[in-house]
Image (spheres, helix red, strand yellow):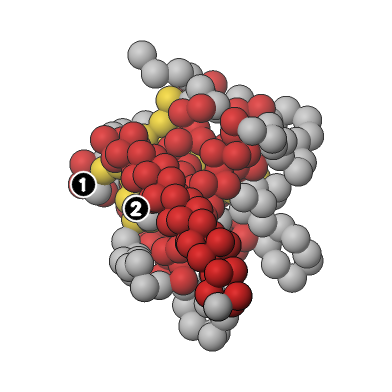
Amino acid sequence: MRRVSLIRRWGLPLCGLLALLLVVMIALNEWMLWKTRPFIQSPSRCTSIPLAIVFGTSRYLRNGRDNPHYHGRLDLAAQLYNEGRIQHLLLSGDNRSLYYNEPVNMQKDLMALGVPPEVMTLDYAGLSTFDTLVRAREVFGVQRALLVSQSWHLPRALFIADVLGLHVEGCSAYGPTLHWTHFQWWREVLARLATLGDLFIWQRAPRFLGPHVDLPDEVISPAD
């Protein structure tokens, strides 16, 4: 009887609290998706904007296979450039060691896809989506850009950019569709919630800023 009493006293309120947290989490996630959905387009419908920001990720998965998200982003970036819909690419990613350099890998692979090196600028300190976008504004002077990534990642990137005052749209690269049964789906939901904290609660700052880097004037102008 005592155990039953303890369960009633603590178990039911705890279950209620967990249920409330789950509802709040789902509501905030859906709000972010709703707010950014109008700004995500398929490749054929993406707006022509002089500058594209390409978000870095690992070239390979943990099992050693090619990462389809990596190749999807690069294939789309090369397509947009070769079609004359973008003029310059800001390649932002992690450069944590001599043996792991996302921006350099992206540059090499984009060159193989026909993109000349002089139209690519590398950001070696894009350690996260948040860092990439803050640095785009503060270090590279970006005011307007096309964000190149997968549809599951773009809502978070677009939301951050909007709060930062950037004029952006998202162009959705191909990649595996995430389902709620996938770990990556839940990871992204939690990342979206953490983003709200970064922006509105603990006022997160990027890990590295550094001196200003000039981009061509014609690719950093604001929206008309």
Q: What is the secondary structure assignment of the residue under circle 1? A: helix
The quadrant holding residue 200 is top right
| View extreme (front): residue | 1
Residue toward you, 39 or 32:
32
Q: What is the secondary structure assignment of the residue under circle 2? A: loop
In percent of the image, x 40 and y 72: which residue is there?
Answer: 182
In percent of the image, x 57 and y 62: which residue is there?
Answer: 10
Residue toward you, 125 or 106:
125
The quadrant holding residue 159 is top left
Q: Residues within 10 Å of mark 2 (few under 14, many from 20)?
A: many
Please identify the quadrant where the C terminus is shown: top left
| View extreme (bottom): residue | 63
Q: From the viewer's perspective, is 96 left or right of 94? A: right
In percent of the image, x 46 and y 28: which residue is there?
Answer: 162
Return the x and y of residue 198 as percentages of the image width and height: 62, 39
Return the x and y of residue 61 as percentages of the image width and height: 53, 77
| Dot label at residue 44 | 1
Count of number-bearing discs = 2
Return the x and y of residue 116 as percentages of the image width and height: 50, 49
The alpha-carbon separation of the residues under discs 1 and 2 comes to: 14 Å
Image position of 49 with respect to 187: above or below: above
Dot 2 corresponds to which residue?
151
Residue toward you, 86 or 40:
40
Image position of 60 with respect to 142: above or below: below
Which residue type carries mark 1?
A: Ser
In percent of the image, x 51 and y 36: which residue is there?
Answer: 160
Q: Residues within 10 Å of mark 1 (few under 14, many from 20)?
A: few
Which residue type carries mark 2?
A: Ser
